[in-house]
Image: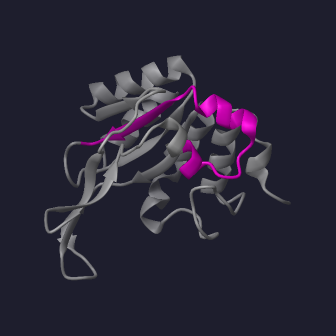
Amino acid sequence: MGNPWKGAKSVADLGNLMADWLEGRISTSPMVVGDDGPDDETRHLIPVLAAANRAGYVTTCSQPGHPESRGYDGRMWRQRAAVEGWVADRRLLDRIRAGAKRAGIDVIAHQPGVRWHDGVPVTDADREPYTWFARTDGHRNQIAYEWNGVGGRAIRELRRSTYLTLIDPVWGRDDRLWPALAGAIR
């Protein structure tokens, strides 16, 4: 079958491919090493993530909120619900931003030309940051990192798109961000 991502001509094409990957119809994604599909912790989010991708919010990373609990290594782990990705459609961007803000979700939108953002911790272990979202060193570098092997026309459209991150500010909560996103993409 080759690389289905190479034929992508737009951000919309990337969204459809990402939805297909989330739902198991294709086995590869430019951001994922191996052919394992989404992480188990994300399985319950697949319906809303696939719908968001098909609507034009091309998600590249997401995680559910998890309350603090002892992990495999004995440390206390916790997570904030978060998602990030690319939006080319300005009306969709506005709807997602408005819906997220109404729900009390933090919104970080990187427009083309933004050089660097340190990011926001979304996972910690023993209250020490472990994972960050919204961390970027600029559109071109972010695109090169995330979208290796993707068609040139889609890359050019990504360069004009907004890199959008949504983060629930409450650690452990997993019932606010996802309904807000689902409502915004309808």
Which image quadrant is residue 8 in?
top right
Is residue 146 placed above or below 57 in the rendered structure?
below
Q: Is residue 43 above or below residue 153?
A: below
Could you say which quadrant of the image residue 143 lies in? top right
The image shows residue 26, relative to residue 15, as above or below, that is: below
Residue 21 at x, y percent in the picture: 65, 55
Left or right for 72, reference 142:
left
Q: Residue furthest bottom?
A: 73
Q: Is residue 33 left or right of residue 166?
A: right
Res. 81 visible in picture: yes
Q: Nearer the viewer, residue 171 or 125?
A: 125
* Furthest residue in direction left, as rendered: 127
**155 drawn magenta:** yes
Foreground pick, 180 / 171: 171
Residue 79 seen in this snapshot: no
Say which residue appears at 24% left-offset and 50% top-offset.
Answer: 173
Residue at 72 percent of width and 57 percent of height: 25
* Relative horizontal placement of residue 52, taking residue 96 as reference (left or right): right
Q: Is residue 153 inside the magenta stretch?
A: yes
Q: Name the residue located 86 percent from the left edge and 60 percent from the top edge.
A: 1
Image spot of residue 174 (x, y percent): 30, 50
Would residue 14 be found to the left or right of residue 63 on screen? right
**Residue 7: image x %, image y %?**
80, 44
Position in image of residue 92 (x %, y %): 51, 23
Question: Looking at the picture, does residue 24 appear above or below residue 113?
Answer: below
Q: Residue at x 55, y 51 (%)?
A: 145
Q: What segment is highlighted magenta in the picture?
A: 143-168
Colour mapping: one colour
